Amino acid sequence: MKINKIFIKNFKSYYNDNEYDLTVDDNKNVILIIADSGYGKTTLMQAINWVLYDEEYLNRFNKGKGNNKITLENWINSTYIEEIKRQNTYGEIEVSMHFEDDNNKYQITNEYVFSFDNSTIQYESHSHTLKKLANNSSQWTSVKSLESEINKILPKNIVQYFFFDAEKQSRLTDPSNQKLVREAIYNVIGLKTLEEAEENLKQIARDFNKQLSALPLGDFQKKQNRIVKLEESINQDEIELKDIQSEIEEIEEYIIDIERKLIDIPDSSNIQEEIDTLKKEKSQLISEKDSLENNIANSNFLLTPTFLESDLYNLKTALNNLKNEGKIPGSINTKLIDEILMAKTCICGADLEKNEGKKAHIEQLKKRIAQQSEDSYKLLEIFVQIGSYIETTDFNSLKRKHNDYIKGVDSLENGIVQIETKIKELSENLGDLDNKEIKELKEKKDELDIGLKKNIEVKGSIAQRKESNEKELEQFRDELGGLALKNKQAQKLRKMIDLTRKVEHELNQIFHDFAEQIKRTISTTTESSWNSLVETTRRLNFEIDDDYKFKVTNNYGSNAINDLSEGQKQGLVLAFVSAISKASDTFPPYIIDMPFGRLGESPQTEVAKLLPKSCKQLILLLNKPEYNEITKKYLQPKSKKTYTLTFDSNKRKTIIN
Amino acid sequence: MNKRKLLRDYLESIDEDTTKQVTYRVLEIQRESEMSNAEKVRRIKGVIENFSNNED
């Protein structure tokens, strides 16, 4: 960057229109502005800053001034203000500058139009414009992004290192002022930009977090976790239900099996019943047997004279024969009849005794025999009839009955024996059954019934829990469905927050990496520039240490910064500025206010020699004592123009000569 | 080594690294001196949102 011309109108001590031609060339690269204090030489530097950075410069200027901040009104020429007030008209404050950079030409103008309303300034309009004549163009164009363009040419954060008060700048060499060095390096890497970026990122992260908090997610995560737990619980319940169902079925099968076994094993009560029935049957049989035996006894009595049977047959046969032969006596004596009857009684007496009908019949026959005893044949017939009766009826019947009785008794006895055997068997079975398997099986069944009941209860409880969980799950799923979209937004926001923080961290990392590299570069470049500018420093080593302090050591490694001459120190400052210029890739003119300050003669020579070499365009703002024979000797040959400023104290205005 | 070279080197190191890409874009936006800070914040937010979405 090279400044060619500057027009200053009503800015501080510059009343109305003023112009500086600051054009330099390679051989004569120095502009000298010489004036006493307060005559407007520092104002020139301020005007250049103001035209470039406008309000931002004013803010920078006011930094650290507390309540003594100045306003633009303070920078309007006071004589001019009085005129405007008096004339009650519009006024203007304006600075324009022509400069070039990278073969492009620029015209920048900063202008405010104002008026006064009862001593209060009113700004009517403001115009901050930049025109550019590009290298390959013949037409001036307005630059829309003025700030951006100017910052590329000369970043506002480092301009202070090129437009500076030499005395203030020399404080850089003070070892206790590492803060200034650090600040300079941080400014080169654009600390403010990075700080602002970090601040903005923090703000953005806060905004995203606010948005995230504002999302009515409720306890989405909790609900999601609950869903997972419910699903797990339901799955677990299903498994448990299956298991318990299997167990129930197994128990049921076992119970059925036991029941089958119990059915297969005769029931003791049935057996007892059967035994009782058998006993009754037996009793009945015994009773029948007794009756039969009684009958047998009776029939035995009747049949006792069985020996008479053959006799009676013989008698009958004999009688029949006699009858047939006609040899039956004409009269049958009663003796025979009695014998026959006796025999008859013997044969069936008892029966006859018991059977009244028969007895009566026999008695009737007896009477008839007695009545018809004379009729032998008739008697014989009666007698035969009795024999036949005995033979055919009573006796045979009795005999058959008797045999039947005996058979019946035998049969009954057999039946009784069978019953007794059966009762014995059953009783034995009953005895076996009562104490063992049935008891065990019944106990087992009871145990299983309890287990089954418990399992059914547990199954019911699990099923109930599962059902309740399923309902809850369904409810949560419904709720989550509504929240899913918001959750997606939340996830997106979380990602953005995460990325924002990563970028913030990255910026911080970049900042430290850049700072370290730039420090190293500036350190090396400063040393070489210093050694090149000031020959007497070639045996000295320079570095910016870890604490951002200037560190100068001699060849023996000893600290030599306090041994430096003022000239060497000033050279170091210029070398440092030069290093900043290179590191920031910015090559503006140096505007140095009071470069010789309170330097003694010797350092003045040193500084005067090195200054023109330090940059391509050098504007030196000197007070009159500074421009002496010593400095003049080295500066005048390099000076393209020398301006001497005077001051009209009546009109309070700078006059450029 | 100067600042521009540092930035150039950084730009070359970006590759596919989302964080670095966003960081570089943030720096570009932040250096826009004509832009109000509110606008910078808005644009940076947009960049972060886009890159977050692209990562999906």
Image: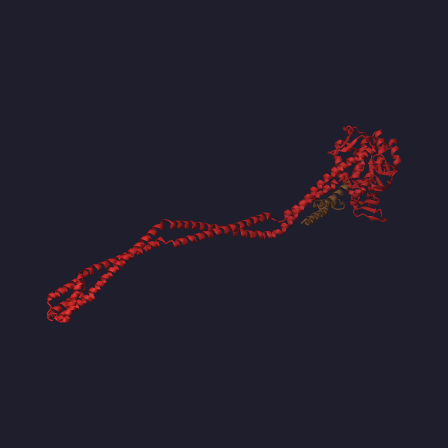
Chain colours: A red, B brown
Q: Is residue A37 visible?
A: yes
**Image-quadrant location for residue B13:** top right
Residue A267 relative to residue A571: left or right: left
Quarter occupied by the C terminus of chain A:
top right
Q: Give the residue drawn at x 23%, y 62%.
A: A401
Q: Is residue A67 visible?
A: no
- The x, y position of residue A210, in whole percent, is 65, 46
Label count reads: 0
Q: Nearer the viewer, residue B32 or A553?
A: A553
Q: Give the residue drawn at x 32%, y 52%.
A: A427
Quarter occupied by the N terminus of chain A:
top right
- The x, y position of residue A536, in whole percent, is 83, 30
Residue A424 relative to residue A12: left or right: left
- The x, y position of residue A383, in whole percent, is 15, 68
Q: Nearer the viewer, residue A213 or A273?
A: A273
Residue A368 relative to residue A80: left or right: left
- The x, y position of residue A169, in whole percent, is 79, 34
| Above/below status of A71 relative to A334 | above
**Image-quadrant location for residue B1:** top right
**Image-quadrant location for residue A189:** top right
